[in-house]
Amino acid sequence: MRVLFCLGLFLLLAGCRSAVGMAGAPDECKFNRLFSWNVPKNEEDFERCSQAGVTDIVVHNQRQYDLALKYGMTPYWRCFIPAGPHPQVMTSEEEKHFAYINGQDIDKKAPDRMKEIHRRRRELKHRYGGEQEAPLDTLNNTRIPCFASDTDLSLSRQKLNDLLKDVPPDNKGMFLDFFGYMNHRGCYCEGCIARYKHYLKEHNLEDSSKNKDEFYTQQLLDYYEGIIGYIKSKHPDFKIVAHFYPDFRPDHLYGNRTKVDFCGQTVAWYFKWPSPKIKQYTKYVTEHAKDYYPFAEGVPFVGLNTDASSSLGFKTPEELEQELKVILAAGGRTLMVCDGRCIIEPGYFEVFRKYCGK
């Protein structure tokens, strides 16, 4: 019995053989897959990405595609973002917020324009599309189209056809991004309001925050299903990689309800989150990935900015390492990172090579 017990203990620890680090993850535990958003600038950077452990990467042209293959990475042909006939509509208060944090009142030639914009974003605790810290927040610089108003997905299909017209024959899939709402809740254009009223009448429901949240959730899910279905009707073997962004306030981790193959959900945003939250989110993303679709894989997403002068959250290499240890300790073995170019910066490169490199 003692021999059997020792054998079982050995097998349990085989993948993580050394002492436990300060975050609870054994020091030798590593990620086995690293998805990178954004493309390296040159061949040297492609090589460094590979050394850092990047396994999967979005590309936008044939040269990038070839370089990814050369350095052992799986390239995904381009990134699709929503298409629609007009921008999403927000409340007047949300529009004022959007204009303020994006400096629409500041002369574009003013020398200190970006400095003032960063000051405003810090003042209002703007979170760049991540989970809100202030009661009101909107996206920075981005007008997302009203994808729900894209009748029969005609504009989205046209856009996808343009993206896929010169896809390499052995391509593995496509990235998806910006499937969400500028105000983190919904779009209030005439079309969306009319559809919401029809939804209430059809289901004999009253107008309430709960029913409104459920309606806008379903619009998101329907759009994902339509886009993924169209892509796979053209390329059945494609794998779909998505980051669920911007954050949807009624349900931060709804991504596992979509038919995405690699479901990137945020477990650590650009702004530093407490370790218990990172652990909680990682466990949910990994343990509940297959609740709806057995083929899906949950991928913990980490936001990373290395420019301390920006109003976007900043992390030191040491803080990044601590987050990676927490994710590993919580069971994460795949990882998704944006901005991907930060992966190869001095100090950060060494951390990724330690936890993701071969």
Image (tube, rainbow, N blue to C red):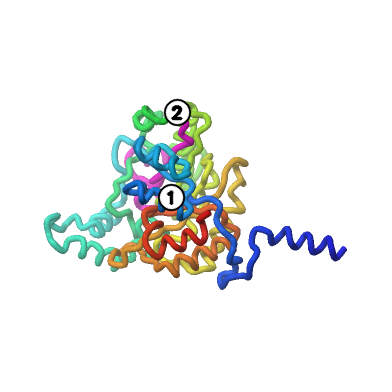
- At x 61%, y 53%, the residue is 287
* Residue in the image at 34% along x and 30% along y: 162
Type of amino acid at the residue the image marks with label 2: Pro
**Circle 2 residues within 10 Å: few <14, some 14–19, many ≥20:** few
Secondary structure category for the residue under label 2: loop
The location of residue 223, given as percent across then percent down, is 44, 38
Which quarter of the picture shows residue 192?
Answer: top left
Quadrant (top left/top right/bottom left/bottom right) for the N terminus: bottom right
In reply to whether residue 58 is colored magenta, the answer given is no
Please say whether residue 326 is visible from this viewpoint.
yes
Residue in the image at 49% along x and 51% along y: 34
Left/right of residue 251 with respect to residue 305 in the rendered view:
right
Query: Label 2, on which residue?
Result: 169
Percent of width and height locating residue 53: 48, 53
Determine if the magenta segment contains residue 192: yes
Q: Nearer the viewer, residue 234 or 219?
A: 234
Give percent across and percent down for residue 252: 48, 54
Q: Residue furthest bottom?
A: 22
User: Which quadrant of the view contains residue 136?
Assistant: bottom left
Q: Residue furthest right?
A: 1
N-terminal of the pair, mark 1 or mark 2, is 1
**Label 1, label 2: how many angstroms apart (C-alpha)?**
22 Å
- The amino acid pointed to by label 1 is Ser
Give the residue at mark 1. Answer: 36
Q: Nearer the viewer, residue 67 or 39?
A: 67
Q: Is residue 326 left or right of residue 191?
A: right
Magenta segment, which residues?
169-197
